């Protein structure tokens, strides 16, 4: 690793695609981390002390599935660097798992988002960077200053060539209204919102639509696509209201877990535009455009690189 690189970059096993992109953008060769599994499943981490001692260290790791394993690896990487003499530690967690558990609906539930924020605080990080938190209010739960970045401008740039005079930006539920409004402003298009009710962690139902969509081509935007239930329900509502069967999905975190592929197969998806906050899927049944977060992260890590 050259002496002029701005920081030592430690890439977790959940983020190899973004790690390569950030390394190329910053000129920082990733630290050579050694990983092995003990027979009982424990993860053993080793970092070369000479690559991190006395240096500013940036640890990159999304807490994608398996969330618990990847969060633990983040903390093990940070602890290894701290004990090897790192001058400072910063965490880049593009996707923060458990962020949807930001409130308790019933008395017997845990506050998962707060618990994860407390866990990250044990990493001795001086700063934490995240992208499009499910609930920005979670920022107040982190022990270190948190910089909450938005991928919407990057997504807007990728979407611009697909925008026509019949494009409408749609929020698939009330929680995505601010994102839809912001994206619509960036693209210079109108927006609409589907009103939904969540029945369970997997199932939702739609209750109505606000906005004009008949004869329009929708861009459905949300912070994440998990099982696809929200988008599938919204698409059904939009088709019933006369939308053209020409849907674009735009999201920061394309988790696409569980029944997501089956559900989205029933939606006339023309294109999925997402970021590499989640390791990109290798095969999807529709065109898939991945926008790297590397420029956004580099501007946050190196204000002089703007």
Image (spheres, rainbow, N blue to C red):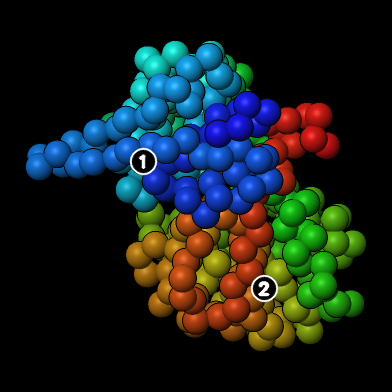
Residue 168 falls in image quadrant:
bottom right
Q: In this view, does 24 lie to the left or right of 303?
A: left
Image quarter of the N terminus = top right
Instruction: Give the image location of residue 65, x and y in percent.
Output: 36, 50
- Residue position for label 1: 70
Mark 1 residue crowding within 10 angstroms, few (<14) / some (14–19) / many (20+): many
Nearest the camera: 73 or 27? 27
Image quarter of the C terminus = top right
Q: Which residue is drawn at 43% across and 69% down?
A: 260
Nearest the camera: 13 or 95? 13
Above or below, 140 relative to 287: above
Image disc number at residue 100: none
Question: Which of pointers 1 and 2 indicates the residue nearer the eye?
Answer: 1
Instruction: Give the image location of residue 255, x and y in percent.
Output: 46, 58
Residue located farthest toward the left when viewing the structure as drawn? 39
Q: In this view, does 159 lie to the left or right of 41?
A: right
Nearest the camera: 243 or 95? 95
Residue 40 falls in image quadrant:
top left
Can residue 248 be seen here? The reply is: yes
Q: Label 1, label 2: how many angstroms apart (C-alpha)? A: 30 Å
Q: How many labels does the image show?
A: 2
Above or below, 182 relative to 254: above
Instruction: Give the image location of residue 30, x and y in percent.
Output: 51, 39
Image disc number at residue 248: 2
Q: Residue at x 71, y 85 (%)?
A: 244
Q: Which residue is drawn at 23% across and 41% down?
A: 36
Q: Which residue is drawn at 45% across and 63% down?
A: 256
């Amino acid at each position: 690793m050259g002496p002029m690189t701005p920081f030592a970059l430690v890439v977790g096993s959940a983020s190899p695609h973004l790690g390569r992109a950030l390394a190329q953008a910053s000129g920082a060769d990733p630290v050579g981390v050694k990983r092995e599994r003990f027979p009982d499943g424990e993860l053993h981490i080793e970092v070369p002390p000479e690559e991190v001692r006395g240096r500013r260290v940036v640890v990159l790791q999304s807490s994608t599935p398996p969330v618990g394993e990847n969060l633990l690896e983040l903390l093990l990487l940070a602890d290894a660097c701290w004990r090897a003499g790192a001058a400072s530690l910063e965490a880049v967690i593009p996707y923060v798992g458990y962020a949807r558990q930001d409130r308790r609906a019933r008395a017997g539930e845990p506050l998962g988002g707060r618990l994860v924020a407390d866990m990250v605080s044990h990493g001795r990080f001086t700063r934490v960077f995240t992208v499009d938190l499910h609930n920005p209010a979670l920022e107040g739960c982190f022990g270190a200053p948190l910089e909450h970045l938005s991928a919407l401008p990057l997504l807007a740039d990728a979407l611009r060539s697909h925008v026509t005079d019949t494009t409408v930006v749609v929020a698939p539920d009330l929680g995505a209204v601010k994102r839809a409004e912001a994206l619509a402003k960036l693209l210079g298009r109108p927006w609409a919102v589907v009103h939904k009710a969540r029945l369970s962690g997997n199932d939702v139902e739609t209750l109505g639509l606000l906005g004009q969509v008949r004869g329009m081509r929708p861009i459905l935007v949300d912070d994440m696509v998990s099982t696809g239930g929200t988008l599938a329900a919204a698409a059904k509502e939009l088709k019933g209201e006369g939308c053209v069967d020409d849907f674009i999905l735009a999201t920061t975190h394309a988790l696409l877990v569980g029944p997501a592929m089956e559900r989205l197969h029933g939606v006339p998806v023309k294109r999925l535009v997402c970021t590499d906050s989640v390791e990109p899927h290798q095969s999807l049944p529709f065109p898939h455009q991945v926008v790297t977060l590397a420029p956004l992260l580099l501007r946050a890590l190196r204000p002089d690189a703007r």
